[in-house]
Image (cartoon, helix red, strand yellow):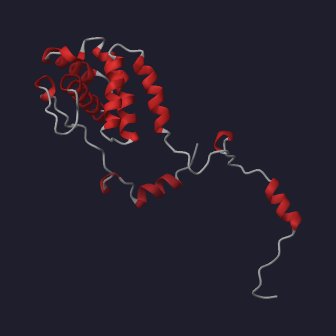
Amino acid sequence: MSGSIPQISAQKTQKTKTKSSPLKTPEYTRDMSINKPIHDYAQRIKRNRHNIQQLPNGTIGLQFLDHLNALGLSLGRVSKCAAHLPVLLRIINGTDIKTMTKTDIEHIVAQINSRPNKESTKADNKLLLRKVVQYAKQGSCAKNTPTPPEVNWISLTVKEKNPKITPENLLTQEEITAILVKPHI
């Protein structure tokens, strides 16, 4: 019977089904449905809201997150803000955000800059500081809301260069061969 599909015996099929794969799927992923969100931003926001609630200025922090939702920001963006907000509120350390002066803001920015984070994370924290102060002082942080002078001076440019792969950084064919031929100890 040339050209026909060979029949697989039921016994062989049964063995294939019971055979365990060397790359076993973790137990917790077996029941995941197709519609379940991968990042689960809602759960992240809920967890961060709980943490924010317990901090000084937590009330204004929660109101700020509600405002971001009301502005129509994506769940991912709100989740990112919710994740950075507890760190910022700890740095602010109970100072009333509505009455902060430029000197207070400079002290907070200095602390953000002295943290051992990537430059992009520092820029995210400074942007969040600007938006939280803008919300506290103006009642909104929408695009058309004026930025208070206390935070208007904060630079958000990222100085860190993103390392790119250049042809000079790649291994040459000779280097690859030398690595493969080199006797292993």
Task: Pinpoint residue 183: horizontal percent, then vertical percent.
Answer: 56, 49
Q: Nearer the viewer, residue 145 or 164?
A: 145
Please state the total of marks drawn on the protein image. 0
- Answer with left or right where residue 158 lies relative to residue 183: left
Q: Nearer the viewer, residue 6 or 83?
A: 83
Residue that sits furthest to the top in the current view: 94
Residue 80: image quadrant is top left
Residue 48: image quadrant is top left
Task: Pinpoint residue 36: horizontal percent, then vertical percent.
Answer: 56, 45
Task: Pinpoint residue 120: horizontal percent, then vertical percent.
Answer: 29, 36
Residue that sits furthest to the right in the current view: 11
Task: Pinpoint residue 94: horizontal percent, then vertical percent.
Answer: 30, 11
Residue 131: image quadrant is top left
Quarter of the image with the N terminus is bottom right
What residue appears at the point 32 percent right and 16 percent down from the top-left corner?
A: 57
Q: Nearer the viewer, residue 13 or 96?
A: 96
- Answer with left or right where residue 138 lies relative to residue 11: left
- Answer with left or right where residue 69 lies relative to residue 104: right
What residue appears at the point 18 percent right and 19 percent down from the top-left corner?
A: 105
- Answer with left or right where residue 114 lies relative to residue 50: left
Q: In the picture shown, does residue 5 fall above or below 59?
A: below
What residue appears at the point 78 percent right and 88 percent down from the top-left corner?
A: 2
Q: In the picture shown, does residue 130 fall above or below 54?
A: below
What residue appears at the point 24 percent right and 28 percent down from the top-left corner?
A: 126
Quarter of the image with the C terminus is top right
